[in-house]
Image (tube, coloured by chain):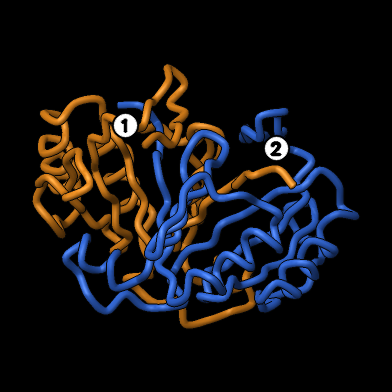
Chain colours: A orange, B blue
Amino acid sequence: MQQQMSVITLGVADLTRSKRFYVDGFGWTPVFENEEIAFYQMNGFVLGTWLKPALEADMQRGGLASPGAFALAHNVATQAAVQPLIDRLANAGGRVLRAADAPAHGGFRGYVADPDDHAWEIAWNPAWPIDAQGHVTFGN
Amino acid sequence: MQQQMSVITLGVADLTRSKRFYVDGFGWTPVFENEEIAFYQMNGFVLGTWLKPALEADMQRGGLASPGAFALAHNVATQAAVQPLIDRLANAGGRVLRAADAPAHGGFRGYVADPDDHAWEIAWNPAWPIDAQGHVTFGN
């Protein structure tokens, strides 16, 4: 079995509000959007932001809760880039959960929630290389 | 800003139980593991499964809820491969949320929850190519 994930889909309440965070905050561009979903082409997979009732209907499971027990991470190339990106995301409708500091395992990171309360860790991790296509490799 | 996600971390209650789903169910191999976390090298990013209290402490946010408002997807190469993988994941500690059927937008998919109630969609989507490295590209 390929060790592979094809899509991550986040449930959102308001696509315009969500897009402000991803487009103005991260600076990303949707590859497709309509009135209920926006897709972003990522490094080897697709990120979808879909109205939560539609995701619940597709999953045949209601009552999806927030904040969920997960975190996404976007790694940046330098320690100095961490806090400015957190600030930019906060200015685009995010909410800072943890200001950037140095964890015991090395590097530098903080957390910001998107407008639907999905957590993003913004991190500098010098042990994990990122190539020109944005592909990230585990390193010790 | 690179349109990139580096890590997705799932909060788990029991690493042995979680590993059964990912290792025996999906057939994946951790690239690193210790008593509180297991990492899997994925297609361009890293999947982490981390004890939920440790994730909450790192995020400085308690009360992470399940099921969260998100879904992960693993796409397979043929329609015939969808339901057998769902069955295999169910036999490795997962719980079927939706048996595979054909959505209005095409393809074929079902949903299974991992032992920590994180939802995986298992899908055949002929419009979205997957290359030999497992990298998935949005297609219409």
Is A108 located above or below residue A120 in the figure?
above
Judge left or right: residue A93 versus residue A74.
left
Q: Are marks 2 and 1 in contact (CB under 8 Å)?
A: no
Q: Residue A55's quadrant in the figure? A: bottom right
The percent position of residue B135, horizontal first and vertical second, equals: 62, 32
The crowding category of the residue bearing disc 2, from other C-alpha atoms within 10 Å (few below 14, some 14 to 19, many at least 20), is some
Q: What residue is at 66 percent from the left and 29 percent from the top?
A: B133
Residue, disc 2: B128
The percent position of residue B117, horizontal first and vertical second, equals: 53, 76
Circle 2: element type: loop
Q: Residue B65's quadrant in the figure? A: bottom left
The percent position of residue A80, horizontal first and vertical second, equals: 11, 28
Distance, label 2 to label 1, CA atoms, is 32 Å
Amino acid type shown at disc 2: Trp
The crowding category of the residue bearing disc 1, from other C-alpha atoms within 10 Å (few below 14, some 14 to 19, many at least 20), is few
Q: Residue B87's quadrant in the figure? A: bottom right
Q: Which mark is residue B138?
A: none
Disc 1 chain ID? A
Amino acid type shown at disc 1: Ala
Q: What residue is at 22 percent from the left and 47 percent from the top?
A: A105
Judge left or right: residue B98 versus residue A77.
right
Nearest the viewer among A121 and B101 is A121
Circle 1: element type: loop
- Judged from this view, the residue extending furthest toward the right is B80
Judge left or right: residue A95 versus residue A135.
left
Is A12 located above or below residue A5 in the figure?
below
Q: Which mark is residue A127?
A: 1
Disc 2 chain ID? B
